[in-house]
Image (spheres, coloured by chain):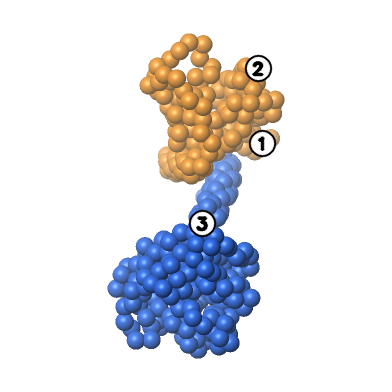
Chain colours: A blue, B orange
Amino acid sequence: MKIPLYLAVAQWTLLFAFGLLLIVVYRQLGRILHKTDTAAPLGPAVGSNAASLEYSRFADDTVQYLTPGDGQPTLLAFVEPTCLSCEKLVLALGEAEHAGELSGLRVLLLTSSPKSYLKVSDAFRATRLECGRILAQATTQAYGATSTPLLVAIDRDGVVRAAAPAIQLAEVRTFGRACLLPPAAGESIPITATAPRYENDLEAATPAAGAD
Amino acid sequence: MDVLILCAKTAVACLLIVAGGAKLSDPASFASTARLFLPFRVAWPLLSAIAVGVSLGELAVGLASLTLPAITALNALVFAIACAFVGVSALGYAFHRGRSCRCFGALSQREFDAASVLRSAVTAGIAAVALAHVGAAAALQLDATARVLLLAAAGLLALAAFTAAKARGTDSEPEPEVAS
């Protein structure tokens, strides 16, 4: 069958026009995603009161309720077993814990993944730190945990003293010291984020309460 | 030579379809541009209707030009519209320099400047090429199926332009306020 010349030309022109529009949409999509990624603040504001949270503890599958400000400084690590930077943070936390540098602190690893996911990571499987699954999406929203890893230092009064992505042992030590800052001292420890923001969307991945 | 003429014809038709579809995604902002060229105060609903009318007109002419290639009068109409673009660009350059023209809705952030006049002139030039006589008459003969398929593809193009402009419009700068 012979195609009229006009039809052939029109087809190619339309294809070209579609291609141009595709590029426009693709670029805009990238822009929107980039905005979404950078616009949201990562972590709670330093100096704010840390929110209470519920999590399912993997060790005994019990639901725990954490109330920051109960007199015990807390170091929260929002991590995912599938995130390489999170593995490094878990190793660094384990090392600091083993060396006694986090004594007096409650160290808690929080993830949105089910318990079965821990086996994908040696660091998560082997860690002796308390690890649990976040039960409510409100928790990740309250802590601004839009990407992992995120380390949050909370003092004994429940005030956030530092919040930033971290993976190195030195950073873990700094966060540990931040947890122990005297209350109302108005001090702050400068935290330099070295960990790349991982693409894992913790907030989106957080399941409804009680789901597994 | 025939290929060149047909390319020019289809290119201008696609341009009109994309421009019409994109403008329809945000008639309010195009209405604010249209207002710049009206010498008297116009009520907002009328202004909005003018904007939608112009967008639909562009879309309709583009669709007709693309799917009915044998009607040579449409080539003249397209050329006249392209000349109108040159006039509008020139007026915009003269009196509203730096204002966004919204020629492609939110798809383009181009302003009225010398380059916009040049672009319009190039478009008019291409439309003028499309006026030329195509040697092989059979080249323009389309059966009903081909016309329907072309219309569907052109409609899809308009829809894609509408969607792309809508997406781009989500974070574009706000247009100046339009007094009613």
- Label 1 resides on the chain identified as B
- SS for callout 2: helix
Q: x, y (%) of residue A64?
A: 33, 77
- SS for callout 1: helix
Q: Is residue B83 visible?
A: no
- Label 2 resides on the chain identified as B
Q: x, y (%) of residue B46?
A: 39, 19
* Label 3 environment density (alpha carbons within 10 Å; few <14, some 14–19, many ≥20): few
**Residue behind mark 1:** B4
Q: Is A43 in front, or is A100?
A: A100
Q: Is residue B153 above or below residue B123?
A: below
Q: Nearer the viewer, mark 1 or mark 3?
A: 3
Q: Name which of mark 1 and mark 2 comes first in the sequence.
A: 1
Q: Residue furthest left?
A: A210
**Residue behind mark 3:** A41
Q: Are marks 1 and 2 in contact (CB under 8 Å)?
A: no
Q: Is residue B170 visible?
A: yes
Marks 1 and 2 share the same chain: yes
Amino acid type at image mark 3: Pro
Amino acid type at image mark 1: Leu
Marks 3 and 2 share the same chain: no
Q: Give the quarter of the figure containing the N terminus of chain B.
A: top right
Which disc, if any, is residue B94? Answer: 2
